[in-house]
Image: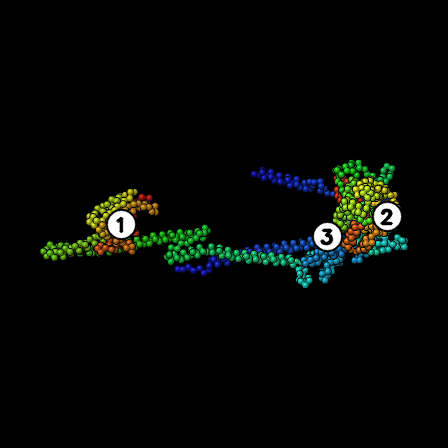
């Protein structure tokens, strides 16, 4: 009896010990704890590398996001959360917003951020108009901005330094989506003294408040700049990154990725999708429409435009145009569902070819062997997926009795000379996630894009847009844009085709990668770590 | 002596059990009530906190955007008869917006209770009593801070006022239900206690009644009980005791009777012996003198008849004295083994002539399994002779005497039963015991000592003699004599 009790006791002790060891060391690799260390290597989405990380004009938003910060930022659900401003207040009339900056935030050179840096950075947005598509979002909307851009004022009076850590913006009218604007990558805060004194040279060795700071350029043997190396900012005001640094270059190869030397690249082949990598998908702010020349017969007929919309199978078209890197998602609404607060899911694209044929026959009064000739107008440079689009669209419209010719333009303005009814491919990327950024540039009667592409004019739509511009209530503004959506669906000045999902492949030992709301360029690298 | 209980056990039991049940029920129900109330309070508290958290979450982005309209819409969609007010405050504690009704309560509306340096998880709970839309309402107020992701400083706070009246209504219902359960339980308890007390005290009462009856001399009242508990055991033991008491009493009465009889007989015997001795001597002298006188003179025929009558009379007196002395004499039995049949036959021989003279038939039915017994043959013969003579004297011409013998068992002992019956006029039942008394006689001539002597002889043999009921007319004497062996 005594020896049995001893054996039992020993068995229990061993079991408890094993269990403790198991729990302490972890029984599964899936719940490993973050570790510091390692350099994250990322291949750029853009094939070119422009070593100028100017938030206003850079094509390398990913790097800009690591180097600099905004007053406010997006979380993964498109919600606005504090950035450099830890708190803000908006006046009841919606005309003033006061930002209270975090204290003790340092630029990479050690100087503390102040309200004057904010004023400088935002004023800068309105300075360079020619390369800057952003300043329309500020000019005319900030008090004193008109005077500033016209040279009649040395500063924007609506950008006010209340004190060292308090910054105020005065809008000319309530700007409900201003916080979304201020969260975009071009609204980064730069060090006033450095940029002022160095000018363009500043961006050769940029300084920001971001979680990573510039270390050096990646060069080849010929000292050509191939990429950039960033290092962890140990003085960062928020959670410090786990990785020691980031190497960023568009020139990292597929082989290097397969060897495990590169951690993240856009998916380039089907093979990658079936491999051992973690594949992440995320929406981009890109939407594709077919703008219809609304003044050219027979497309000036609303019924014909509606028939064209009904007769195109967007699902097949999206499938034909998709690639391993970029998957097109067919959309049925002009305002895509990714924009915060709008439609929870995309309206399924309507496809009724029989009905389309009937309407066309009725409206066009074509003879049995007669076909309608339309042009598909694309802007150079050519793109592989343009070819797929053209081919598939041609096939589909042929079934409707339409003959489609594909034409390429050197510039958008060339379309103004077109006399043939056309469908113009409008490949549009939003500057910030707000429906105004789609409707205003593309469908407002006086907008440049509309003037070039659709020549569409709707007094009612313009009226609603004007109402949305000054609407102080977010909810009411949402319903205004939903009414605009109804008008566009009815009038069909364009055919919404796709939104885009970008795919990236990630090495399995890279953890903490979460697809951000705005696209991979806005990835929160602070939460990424690399397993040994 | 009558026993009278001053305080009824039944009522004491009833009272005691009722008190106990009431106490138990009260404790249990109070505990349940307390627990239920605590759970309800906890539930209400948690629900209110959850509601506050929900309002904070739903209005997070509207708070960030300072979209009062959206917040007001959310407030309007949630405010109800139970969720009375929702107030949002900015970081400094100034109200951003709230439902209109609460703005009249400046002490509630004016300021946030939660401090600017609050941390996630902080909350302030307050209970209030206010008059809301003209009705007094008790409410629980919860205020929690609102934090934005990535920020460790409070962004805003939300305060909600949740009516506790539904909860108190529930509590009231619960209390009512518990009260009903308690009253119902108490009632059932009283009824149960009553029946329990009755079940315990009824047999006791019967016991008491039986005790009183026994004390009054009535042993005929049994205690009826079907219970198998201690009370039933007591009742059964009591019944057993009464039965034994009855048997003992009967034995004592028999013994008393026998003692009295013996004393009576002894005193009669002493008296008789004294009288007999006192009479005998002078009587002998008288008889001798009469004989002398007859020898001395010649008397006339009628004088001789008178003298003969006188001698006859003296002879009868001598006979009586002899019988009396014989009855009073305690003589030892001369025991030997005899066959009963033989003794009976011998007795019959003696009166054979008398029987045949009257044409009386004797029917005999002797048992086959009779053994011989140890007895005084002469004395037994005397007994049988006495009985047969009495039968012969009682029977008219042509009568019948039945004699039977058999063995009977009783109390583990075998006894020989002798039955002598006649079909004469019979003996009145009232005299059945008396005829065995000395000097009792139903015959015109007789001293009344024959049957008394017969009983004395039979009892000397440890037997019994009695008159028994007979089918038809006549008398039946039953004599039981021990066989002298175990049955």
Residue A172 position within the rendered picture, expressed as x and y whole percent measured from the top left = 84, 56
Return the residue at label 2.
Answer: A452
Q: Which residue is mark 3?
A: B57
Mark number displayed over residue B421: 1
In which chain is the residue bearing label 3?
B
CA distance for labels 2 and 1 = 157 Å
Residue A525 % position (x, y): 78, 44
Q: Toward the viewer: A318 or A313?
A: A313
Chain holding disc 1: B
User: Is the residue at mark 2 from the same chain as the one at mark 1?
Assistant: no
The quadrant in which the N terminus of chain A is found is top right
Q: CA distance from mark 3 to mark 1?
A: 121 Å
Tags 3 and 2 both on a single chain: no
Quadrant of res B279: bottom left
Q: Residue at x 79, y 42 (%)?
A: A399
Tell me, for residue A420, which label it has, or none: none
Q: Quick one: SS at disc 2?
A: helix
Q: Secondary structure at mark 1?
A: strand
Q: Quadrant of residue B179?
A: bottom right
Query: Where does residue B70 sit, x and y in percent of width and height?
Result: 75, 55
Tell me which residue sits at (79%, 43%) in the image: A400
Q: Chain of mark 2?
A: A
Residue B24 visible? The answer is yes
Looking at the image, residue A449 sits to the left or right of residue B222; the answer is right
| Quarter the C terminus of chain A occupies | top right
Report, in whole angstroms, how far the alpha carbon at label 3 lies from the one at label 2: 44 Å
């Amino acid at each position: 009896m005594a020896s049995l009790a001893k054996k039992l006791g020993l068995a229990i002790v061993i079991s408890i010990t094993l269990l403790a060891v198991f729990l302490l060391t972890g029984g599964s690799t899936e719940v490993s704890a973050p570790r510091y260390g390692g350099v994250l290597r990322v291949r750029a989405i853009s094939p070119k590398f422009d070593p100028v990380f100017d938030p206003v004009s850079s094509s390398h938003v990913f790097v800009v996001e690591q180097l600099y910060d905004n007053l406010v930022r997006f979380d993964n659900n498109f919600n606005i959360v504090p950035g450099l401003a830890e708190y803000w207040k908006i006046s009841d009339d919606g005309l003033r917003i006061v930002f209270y900056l975090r204290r003790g935030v340092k630029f990479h050179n050690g100087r503390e951020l102040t309200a004057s840096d904010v004023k400088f950075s935002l004023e800068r947005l309105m300075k360079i108009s020619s390369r800057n598509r952003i300043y329309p979002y500020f000019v005319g909307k900030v008090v004193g901005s008109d005077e500033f851009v016209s040279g009649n004022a040395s500063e924007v009076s609506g950008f006010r330094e209340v004190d060292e850590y308090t910054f105020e913006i005065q809008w000319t009218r309530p700007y409900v989506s201003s916080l979304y604007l201020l969260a975009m990558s071009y609204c980064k805060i730069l060090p006033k003294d450095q940029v002022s004194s160095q000018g363009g040279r500043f961006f050769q060795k940029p300084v920001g408040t971001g979680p990573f700071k510039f270390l050096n350029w990646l060069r080849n043997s010929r000292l050509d700049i191939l990429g950039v190396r960033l290092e962890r900012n140990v003085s960062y005001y928020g959670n410090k990154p786990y990785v020691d640094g980031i190497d960023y270059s568009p020139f990292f190869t597929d082989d290097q990725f397969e060897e495990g030397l590169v951690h993240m690249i856009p998916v380039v082949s089907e093979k990658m999708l079936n491999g051992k990598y973690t594949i992440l998908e995320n929406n981009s702010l890109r939407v594709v429409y077919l703008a219809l020349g609304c003044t050219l017969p027979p497309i000036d007929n609303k019924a014909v435009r509606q028939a064209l919309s009904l007769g195109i199978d967007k699902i097949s078209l999206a499938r034909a145009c998709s690639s391993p890197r970029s998957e097109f998602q067919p959309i049925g609404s002009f305002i895509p569902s990714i924009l915060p607060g709008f439609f929870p899911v995309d309206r399924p694209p309507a496809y009724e070819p029989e009905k389309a044929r009937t309407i066309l026959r009725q409206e066009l009064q074509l003879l049995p062997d007669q076909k309608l000739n339309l042009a598909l107008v694309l802007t150079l440079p050519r793109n592989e997926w343009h070819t797929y689009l053209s081919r598939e669209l041609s096939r589909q419209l042929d079934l409707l009795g339409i003959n489609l010719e594909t034409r390429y333009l050197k510039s958008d303005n060339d379309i103004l000379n077109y006399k043939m009814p056309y469908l113009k491919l409008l490949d549009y990327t939003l500057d910030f996630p707000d429906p105004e950024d789609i409707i205003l540039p593309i469908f407002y009667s006086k907008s440049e894009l509309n003037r070039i592409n659709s020549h569409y004019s709707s007094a009612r739509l313009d009226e609603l847009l004007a109402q949305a511009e000054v609407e102080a209530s977010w909810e009411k503004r949402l319903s205004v844009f939903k009414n605009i959506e109804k008008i566009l669906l009815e009038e069909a000045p364009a055919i919404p085709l796709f939104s885009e999902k970008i795919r990236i492949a990630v090495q399995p030992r890279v953890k903490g990668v979460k697809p951000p709301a705005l696209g991979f360029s806005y990835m929160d690298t602070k939460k990424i770590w690399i397993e040994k | 002596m009558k026993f009278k209980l001053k305080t009824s056990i039944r009522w004491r039991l009833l009272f005691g059990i009722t008190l106990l049940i009431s106490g138990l029920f009260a404790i249990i129900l109070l505990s349940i009530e307390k627990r239920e109330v605590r759970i309800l309070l906890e539930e209400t508290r948690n629900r209110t906190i959850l509601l506050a958290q929900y309002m904070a979450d739903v209005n997070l982005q509207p708070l960030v955007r300072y979209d009062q309209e959206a917040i007001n819409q959310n407030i309007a969609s949630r405010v109800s008869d139970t969720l009375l007010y929702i107030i949002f405050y900015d970081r400094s504690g100034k109200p951003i917006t709230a439902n209109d009704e609460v703005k009249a309560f400046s002490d509630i509306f004016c300021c946030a209770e939660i401090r600017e340096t609050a941390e996630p998880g902080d909350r302030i709970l307050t209970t209030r009593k206010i008059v809301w839309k003209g009705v007094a309402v008790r409410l629980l107020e919860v205020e929690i801070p609102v934090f934005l992701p990535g920020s460790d400083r409070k962004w805003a706070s939300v305060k909600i006022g949740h009516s506790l009246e539904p909860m108190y209504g529930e509590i009231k219902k619960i209390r009512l239900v518990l009260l009903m359960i308690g009253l119902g339980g108490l009632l059932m308890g009283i009824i149960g206690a009553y029946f329990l007390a009755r079940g315990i005290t009824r047999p006791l009462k019967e016991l008491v009644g039986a005790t009183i009856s026994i004390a009054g001399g009535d042993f005929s009242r049994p205690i009826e009980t079907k219970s198998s508990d201690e009370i039933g055991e007591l009742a059964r033991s009591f019944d057993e005791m009464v039965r034994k008491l009855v048997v003992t009493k009967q034995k004592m009465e028999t013994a008393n009777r026998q003692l009295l009889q013996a004393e009576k007989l002894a005193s009669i015997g002493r008296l008789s012996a004294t009288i007999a001795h006192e009479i005998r001597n002078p009587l002998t002298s008288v008889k001798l003198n009469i004989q002398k006188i007859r020898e001395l003179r010649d008397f006339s025929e009628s004088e001789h008849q008178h003298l003969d009558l006188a001698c006859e009379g003296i002879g009868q007196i001598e006979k009586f004295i002899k019988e009396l002395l014989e009855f009073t004499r305690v003589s030892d039995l001369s025991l030997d083994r005899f066959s009963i049949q033989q003794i009976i036959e011998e007795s019959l021989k003696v009166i054979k002539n008398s029987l045949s003279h009257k044409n009386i038939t004797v029917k005999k039915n002797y048992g086959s399994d009779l053994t011989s017994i140890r007895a005084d043959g002469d004395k037994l013969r005397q007994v049988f002779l006495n009985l047969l003579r009495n039968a012969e004297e009682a029977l008219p011409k042509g009568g019948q005497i039945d004699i039977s013998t058999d063995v009977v068992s009783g109390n583990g002992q075998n006894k020989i039963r002798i039955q002598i019956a006649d079909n004469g006029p019979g003996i009145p039942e009232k005299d059945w015991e008396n005829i065995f008394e000395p000097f009792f006689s139903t015959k015109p001539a007789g001293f009344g000592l024959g049957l008394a002597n017969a009983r004395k002889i039979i009892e000397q043999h440890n037997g019994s003699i009695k008159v028994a009921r007979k089918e038809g007319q006549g008398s039946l004497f039953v004599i039981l004599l021990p066989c002298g062996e175990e049955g």
